[in-house]
């Protein structure tokens, strides 16, 4: 930590700060600058108590941490890329993976039709929500276990692996029985109890970025998964909340090089949530592929206008097939398969 | 809903939109404007499927809902203010209530010392976290049930009612046994499963605003509580996330008149989280009281610099006592007690 | 500056950093911590070149400034409050001042009617835009010099001082001939050429906060005024842009204690722009007064629904008069007149 | 416009709204829905006064515009792409253009060395600031006219066209004498007087997006240029301000498909300002090219750590050359040259 002192404080006030720094387990080291005195506090910031509380003292101007707060998730201690094998589909390897399917599982017909179509177009993982977190209690909340069973049936028929959202600690075991990847949604990205429960199922976890989550917070939420014994984590950018209203969210594609730099875990891009508009999905996918995303997560529906949830951001089966074609030269340019 | 059509579309394309609107259960009503044709779709937007998915159609420019999505929480259907009685302490009545105490329960000495001091200064409810949601898995996570027991002891000694945070669905019953008010934190404000579990305990709920929650989303999260049979909800503004870094959050005091206008539920202001800086707490409290807040939620610690969590935003016992004195003329000016 | 080095770098890489720090005019001071080495760079950060560019070096993790970048505006070097005398009306003194009037000057009748009414209700300064910055080129752009003349006429009739917006460097002399205070609008808050031109007229300046301006940037924009020889600066908070759409902007009342802490200049609150909704103005004013604002800037119009600009945020003459009455107890509680 | 009325208002209150709508020049058309009555107001929203002021009336719940506010800039009235010819370099055509050079012009050596290097690597336009808008008055403000002369010399030596920033209305003629493209910076994006002065020089304009500018505001700022007789406008996304602090700004690449959809003007991406970090520039460029950007604007400096401004985001000559190589497959994949 660096503790910056206010100018013109007394010797006694300075000494009190040094004493408190020692009391909290750090070794103080004073540097007298031109206008400010800075105290370097030497010690492991992760195991000692934070010194940030010192900012409440009148003689202290600011306190700045210098150490990174995440460890297991960090590329620093794990230089090689992590790859996650899901029923033979490797995320984080040379092949770009595409996860596609409806926002919500609505019926056997809807799901199977979509599953066959996305598989034919080249997707390797089927997405579909059985439990849906909805802003209003009056909106469709998902088919629940019936939806999970339909997903399992679609997997049996198509061979696609399954990703679906986990909403509740109490359902972690149940959802893990059916799903190949557990998705943690943006609104639960700092629901740490849910992260721990999900981690303990041993299933691979896809962790969406929260609506206003800083990179450090996202990496630390991922740290909860690894610290609970589950190494199979992938991050998923799905757009952040900004002042812009033209799009539902602002897809932050800079997360791709940043996650690759800070962490060894794969990064997945969700252009459907990311823009909230079907007409922007194709361009977003191209950008994501070019920038090095490991996988895409795309919402596809046979008749988007009649979808039971988030219809405005789902593409039709035809649009999806065309998109997969259009992506090919970019996948090649990115050196992926 | 208002469905705005693109200019220069064919009659056939327009007819297809009208047909789909009917199919989705609304009655279309066409208005031809100077540059745009708008279709008013008549029907109850809460019970029918949303028409927003129509925005995926090429001939549709935009879809605008006109109806409010919340109902039980709304002042429209419940014109009188709701007041919540917690062990004789009424929140939402004439008296301004002050909830005060440490961020985390750390020890019996720390808690009891604080409880006696805040009671002597005029607080009527004791706050303290037993389960703490922490950004990093390596930070102090709260004393757990031991913390709950200390809170109960403090209540027995001082007569103060208790508010503490609920983090996990699986702990709803346990925390409800000890607490008089269940707090739902900002990071769980759209953890709907937790909201439902909390509502079903029957205890009063204090719902913090999420870090980037729009007013409508906050009101709808509150709707989950009322729709699950619990009328004792209060909203708590604790600052939103913006681009500003001088303060940890931006306390949005406009929530006071807005919640009063849109809803019948009480509104509480948390200036400690709201600014993240102890030196701004007093001014924030004065503004909140003047604008009509029903209660304040203030973090107080005997030695903030040594707090185990969020020390930078906690005020000392002396500062708290002085603050309570300074608030008196503003409470009187606001016509409160 | 504190320069944080990456772990596991070679001695040679470290030496290169120390050499570059010296080359850029600072004295390096090495502190070896548990996981990171930090180099304190001693020197005046305002006169030397910034070291932040060192962050491009592969062996550097981050660079953190420790010194404040503003000087003349800072309370550190000027502990007493500055007060500004405008035709005998003192802003920043014991009396709370109210600046009121229409968004735009539209006609002699509209302006004079408003001026007399706001004066009768207790306002001491008349606001009114003669040059209007409008989002669209097709919107009313203000009456120009004719508007300035009407403002001068209103001043002659009522004795109220005049505040009006300056939009263009080329009009600085002209507007300064008529106005008692020059307003710099939010969209020009970092138009440094305009700030310099305004400062050089010698007239008092009211500097609105930009839509997404950090505190430090705002203080530095004010520094441009003082550094160009004009000490009569007041800051004006008018709401920042956030994700929230219920209000047009989010009024950040924490600016009141922050400006008071960091600077000696007065702080004015604009609740009309701040919320963009007439129905929130009264509550915002009460909060602002309680928190220590030196003045309020309120938009008032005889018939808001027919205003030529920003009608939704203007209050009527009757509402304004009632508001001035309602503020009295809060002004007294705040120890103001 | 759609005017939504509150429920349970009297017939008289409704009639008053209809009368006012007529008075303001629109034809009202009533639609009675299940819970709300909506009045469609028929008329040209660009030429009539806005009805948004009606929101101040107690019986009105909200007012929603339905018409687009921009016209000349809109693809609706101009379906073909516009291309801008700058000394034979076409922006908005089949060839992807690269504008590169230092943040600030510092010296003849620095500029010429950079100009030759970027030209050799494939850039066709040289960027360089002669007038610099700086957050602090104590920072380097640019070489002024001397900088313009150096740019002209670099053009003469290399044949590269020149883009440089215009900061002041009073310098529009001067800068236009030297520059081939006038850049309007983010902080001046709604400095309408500057936009008008720039437009009137007749030179092509590159309009950066403001730090918190919504798409509609950006398009309308562009409308100011076209409405003042200058058709040669290009938009430039340079990152928006969000809560994220890892990057200086959040580069919003969704602007590429959005500008292409809404407007006929070219779109340029500035990855240097966009991220504020040199290590993210290459990935950002790849994404921009894949998504269909017409040009890139990249900051390049011979020794970034010693740059007089914004060193942290400038890439070295070597990195730039490598980047240009790496972009080739993506340019081909995007069907550009």
Image (cartoon, coloured by chain):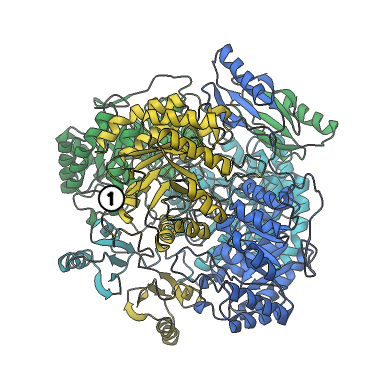
Chain colours: A blue, B yellow, C green, D cyan
Residue at the top extreme, as displayed: A11
Residue, x 48% and y 19% (percent of image)? C77
Image quadrant in which the C terminus of chain C is located = top left
Percent x, y for residue B280?
44, 32
Question: Which sits in the foreground, A44 or A5?
Answer: A44
Q: Residue at x 51, y 49 (%)?
A: B175
**Residue A300 visible in the snapshot:** no
Residue underneath mark 1: C278
Q: Is residue A175 above or below residue C163?
A: below
Q: Work out which quarter of the rendered image holds the N terminus of chain C and state it.
A: top right
* Location of residue C210 with respect to D196 vertically, above or below: above
> Residue B171 appears at what percent x and percent y?
55, 52
Residue C53, by quadrant, is top right
Q: Nearer the viewer, residue C189 or C290?
A: C290
Residue A9: which quarter of the image? top right
Q: Position of residue C224 (x, y in %)?
A: 47, 31
Instruction: Label 1: state its secondary structure.
Output: helix
Residue at image location 27% in from the left, 44% down from the top: C282
Look at the picture and state if B236 lies above or below B306: below
| Res C44 seen here | yes
């Amino acid at each position: 930590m660096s503790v910056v002192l206010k100018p013109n404080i007394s010797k006694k006030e300075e000494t009190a700060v040094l004493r408190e720094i020692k009391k909290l387990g750090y070794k103080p080291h004073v540097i007298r600058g031109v206008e400010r005195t800075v105290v370097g506090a030497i010690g492991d910031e992760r195991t000692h108590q934070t010194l940030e509380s010192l900012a409440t003292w009148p003689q202290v101007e600011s306190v700045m941490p210098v150490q990174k707060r995440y460890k297991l998730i960090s590329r620093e201690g794990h230089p090689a890329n992590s790859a996650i094998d899901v029923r033979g589909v490797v995320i984080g390897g040379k092949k770009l993976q595409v996860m596609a399917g409806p926002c919500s599982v609505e019926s056997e017909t809807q799901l199977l039709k979509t599953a066959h179509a996305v598989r034919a177009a080249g997707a390797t993982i089927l997405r579909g929500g059985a439990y849906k977190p909805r802003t209003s209690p009056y909106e469709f909340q998902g088919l629940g276990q019936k939806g999970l069973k339909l997903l399992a049936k679609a997997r049996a028929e198509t061979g696609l692996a399954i990703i679906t959202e986990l909403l509740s600690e109490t359902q972690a075991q149940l959802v893990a029985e059916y799903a190949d990847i557990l998705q943690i949604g943006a609104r639960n990205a700092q629901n740490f109890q849910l992260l721990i429960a999900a981690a303990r199922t041993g299933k691979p976890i896809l962790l969406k970025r929260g609506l206003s989550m800083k990179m450090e917070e996202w990496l630390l939420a991922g740290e909860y998964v690894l610290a609970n014994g589950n190494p199979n984590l992938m991050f998923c950018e799905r757009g952040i909340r900004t002042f812009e209203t033209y799009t539902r969210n602002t897809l932050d594609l800079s997360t791709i090089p940043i996650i690759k730099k800070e962490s060894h875990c794969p990064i997945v891009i969700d252009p459907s949530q990311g823009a909230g508009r079907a007409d922007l999905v194709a361009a977003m996918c191209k950008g994501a592929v070019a920038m090095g995303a490991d996988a895409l997560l795309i919402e596809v529906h046979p008749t988007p206008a009649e979808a039971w949830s988030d219809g405005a951001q789902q593409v039709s089966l035809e649009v999806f097939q065309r998109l997969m074609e259009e992506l090919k030269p970019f996948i090649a340019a990115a050196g992926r398969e």
